[in-house]
Amino acid sequence: MTTFRSPSFELPPEDRASSPYTGYTRAHWEAAADGLLHAAWRWATPGGALLDLPGPPSHSGVRSDGLEGYARTFLAAAFRVAGAEGKDPHEWLDRYARGLASGTRTPGRDDTESWPVILDHHVQGQPMVESASVALGLRLTRPWLWDRLSAEVQDRAELWLRGALRHLPAGNNWYLFPYTVAGFLESVGRGDAETARARERALKLLEGWYRGDGWYADGDGRAFDHYNGWALHLYPVLDAHLAGDGSASAHYGARLREHLESFSLMFGADGAPLHFGRSLTYRFAASAAVGLGAVCGHTPLSPGVSRRLVDGSLRYFLERGASGGDGLLSLGWHGPHPATLQSYSGPASPYWASKAFVALLAPAGHPLWTSVEEAAPSEGADRVLSVPAPGFLVQSTRADGVVRLHNHGSDHVRPDEGEPAAGTDPHYARLAYSTVTGPTSAANLADNHLSVTVGGVRSTRRRIHPLGAGHGDGWGWAGSWHTPVFPAGPSTVPGLRVESVTVARGRYELRVHRVLGAPDGARAELTGWATEPGGPVRSQLYGLHGWAAPEEVRAPQGTAFTRWAVLPRLAADVAGDVVLVALASLTAEPEAGPLEPVVDTTHVRPCPDEDGDPGGDPGGDSGGDSGGVGVEVCWAEDGARTRIFFGRGAATVDHS
């Protein structure tokens, strides 16, 4: 069961008149920022340059982690003070000014205060990440901090920041860090050809990473996740807003607006964002795009809906132990959770959550704070929304407020790398994610996964190739194919491929898989959602065609939501080409019935492909030489029929 607790710092009384869903107001945001900052500053060095928070260091080392503590908390303080038009009752900016002077005095020196120098991402790159927060904080607070520094300290700060312009970023959102540094330097009259090149390079790459539907890939591959909101949209939109650049604001703002059309549905009725993708320890930073849209005016959401989403996300984490008894944000999701982390996560990493405080740039009289909270998109009617560019299918149900994301397009595999099973990331490889469940540990059986076992070795899913997506009134679908890869023995089996389609309707998930080229003796397995035994959220899985009876298996390492989890599993012996059909459900609805009566009939039959050729396409880009296959499911409640067709490296679905 979920344990609710108050944060270790004091919050104002709830205001249920203006905030009927959460009770939170702008004053709660200011109090949360102050509480988090007070807790973090207890661990500052004497000169204030490093905040050495307790905990195991990241792979970048203790000094870099200390800079991270300074830079990321500075971002929260900057939003807090800038949103209050310079009012700084706790004198945060004096502390950060002192720390800036101390840290830039002798960069790279092994002493108590000096900041590490910025080098290439593969050498000593983490300071480049933090330079963006330092630069953005200085830009936001220029009248009250930067303009009051001595010329010597300004020059030292510029010299340190320029390291970000002169070294190589990682090939993803990192290019927006020198972009942000350059934007600050130009805003204080220190721009030149070097700053112009950094900005031009970043924006050119950003254009190539934009894939449509308001979604950017995080680099040249197909990584789509929360970095869209807290990085890829945030930096260019906020830069244009601060610069008063109407043309750039319109260009990038239109993309943010479209992004929020789908992303706003990805918060549950309890305020939780989807537990999906990397860096989830940033927690309520997931609401940054919503707050930014309201601040800059680039949003399809009413102020009351925007407020509901940002308030709900902040409250969700604060009352579930994100900040422990010492007031520090822990490394995890609710509380500490090592499986949520990446190797670059250090004690101060969670403070990228500071980006959510961008909402404070809306002053007290802004509609974001004066409008009454309205229902979140997931609190309205049941919805199914396909997002073709990233290959997502989003499914929400009003009865329980649960949101599910069916992933048929985001894989976090770079175009220049292979697909070793050792690189499997549970936060991308699974078929589905939600606001109430997390993936199982890599050491336990994978949830929401179609695997093929060959020679006693179970396959995993790496690179995901979309097959299409779409939606209609009350239903939607998305599909993909992948090459199963194996962690032991030969990494692949020649000709083996899995095609997958998810059709969502209400709380139901029709999961259809075509296994092609399975060798003799192979076995397929399909798992459902991993949930707490006896908890309020239930996972169901029922075979409709080709599967044996389900069984329940254990995941003793649990998930970010429960210390110990169970999940349903179906299995089938497979050889050659086989179609398997199942029905799944994740629900917190107490009266939800079993899955057996939901579907009347299921038919699977060979059929011609699009050209009427029953032989299929031997050279299609999905690698297959099998003919087309059709699946038809008749739903018991209303007699509606769902038809799925596989053929020629694509899938089509209709529902009537």
Image (tube, helix red, strand yellow):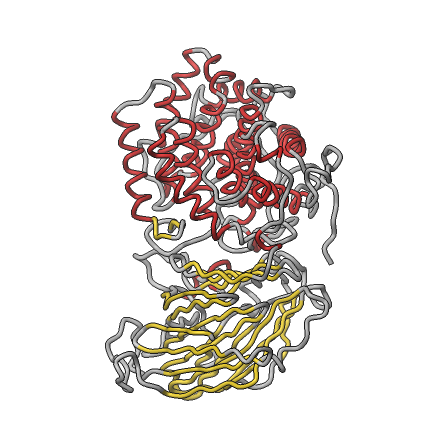
Q: Position of residue 46 (x, y in %)?
A: 59, 22
Q: Is residue 264 above or below residue 535?
A: above
155 and 265: which one is in front?
265
Residue at image coords 47%, 77%? 642
Q: Is residue 204 above or below residue 225?
A: above
Q: Is residue 56 visible?
A: no
Q: Is residue 596 left or right of residue 614?
A: right
- Quadrant where the N terminus lies? bottom right
Q: Is residue 172 left or right of residue 474?
A: left
Q: Is residue 207 above or below residue 487?
A: above
**Image quadrant in which you'd find residue 328:** top right
Q: Position of residue 539 (x, y in %)?
A: 63, 70
627 and 250: which one is in front?
250
Residue at image coords 54%, 51%? 341
Q: How many marks?
A: 0
**Image quadrant in which you'd find residue 374:** top right
525 and 260: which one is in front?
260
Residue at image coords 70%, 43%? 20
Q: Is residue 250 visible?
A: yes
**Image quadrant in which you'd find residue 5:** top right
Q: Position of residue 603 (x, y in %)?
A: 47, 87
Q: Position of residue 446 (x, y in %)?
A: 54, 68
